[in-house]
Image: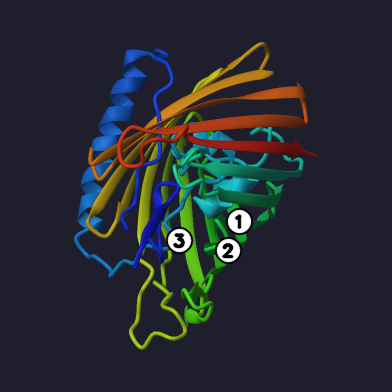
Amino acid sequence: MFRSFGGVNHPIMPLSHPNVLTFRSLLLPFDSIFALVRSLLFLLLAGVSVAQFPVPAYAAFEDGFIGARAFAMGGAYAAIGNESDGLLVNPASIANLRHNPESSQSAQQVSATTARLHVGLSDDTSITQNLVSYAYSQPTRGAIGFLWKRLDAANLYSEDYLLIGLSRSYDLGTENKRRISFGSAVKLLSWDTAPTIGADGLVVEDLRGRSRLALDIGMIFRPSPNIPIALSIQNLNTPNIASRDSFSRESLARQVMLGIGIITSNSTWGMDLVFRESEVNVKVGIESQFYEDSLTLRGGFRLENLAWGTNLTLGGGYRPFRSLRIDYGFLFPIGGIRDTSGSHRFSVVYDF
């Protein structure tokens, strides 16, 4: 039995719901838009060919959302992620954890996120997420990152992610500043449910949860400094996540993400294509900086299964000083869950 929490499926409820947004129109040069569209068409064709080899899927651990920045950009983060919480989307992203791409100095970052999903449900169900991440990057030696994330649905169902990842970047010549980053992560996935209590106060059913290791790998290629292209493969080993009381295997589906971004002096565009079994999800996000990067506005959307459902997202970030940023992200479902005031996410990011 499955149920959807926060736009994703989990082992106690049915069907996933979209997650993503459009906030406002910011223009790029025509050549940049053409290059982006052309690259996305190529990625779509490549991804469809990958999707021809499906893996049995079960609706757990499908929640790919991380910090409020990615949340506000519709989850389009595979190529443009350059922060510690990007480890969950693409482990190669932590190699780009430095404020000045030309600098050879090390960088560290810690972030904390808390979220309330689908606030205002008629049954007053409280669905929360919490996340803490840390990453250290040294350009000549590589990067290491740690991440913990927990989803809790009214104390009835919970999921925990614990990740450790490694990443390293390599220069491909000096003339065009081409660069490629590789990364991998090992994650411990755990889930559990509360026992079902009958009218007589006795336990009717108590499914025992499961803990399993999963492997993620990722790559980010920069044919030019401002156009990252990414590939991320999650759950490479398709671990069995069935209850310990189950006699049948339930494999966590392998997920392939293809992403591309365009980075200018004051804005960032990102698009991801996500392939999971027979589903194809499209994520699009944008952010723009103002007032010497002290204020950031973001927006995005996601098409679930190429228009089966749509979520709109928006948000922003504020830097009270250079090393600290406070982010907020909001998601409103256009279809699926109704009578809710949306999902809200807050993050605090500190660089040192």
> If you read the primary sequence from the N terminus, does the residue marked by circle 2 or circle 3 appear first?
3
Q: Residue at x 66, y 55 (%)?
A: 145
Query: Is label 3 in a helix, a strand or a loop?
Result: loop
Q: Residue at x 51, y 24 (%)?
A: 298
- Residue of label 2: 160
Query: Is label 2 in a helix, a strand or a loop?
Result: strand
Query: Is label 1 in a helix, a strand or a loop?
Result: strand
Apparent side of residue 192 relative to residue 317 in the rendered image (left or right): left
State whether residue 167 is above or below residue 82: below
Q: Residue at x 46, y 75 (%)?
A: 198
State whether residue 203 is above or below residue 167: below
- Residue of label 1: 149
Q: Residues within 10 Å of mark 3 (few under 14, many from 20)?
A: many
Q: Amino acid at mark 3?
A: Phe
Q: Amino acid at mark 2?
A: Asp
Check if mark 1's residue and mark 2's residue have beta carbons within 8 Å.
Answer: yes
Q: CA distance from mark 1 to mark 2?
A: 6 Å
**What is the quadrant of residue 251 in the picture?**
bottom left
- Image position, residue 148 (x, y; %): 64, 58
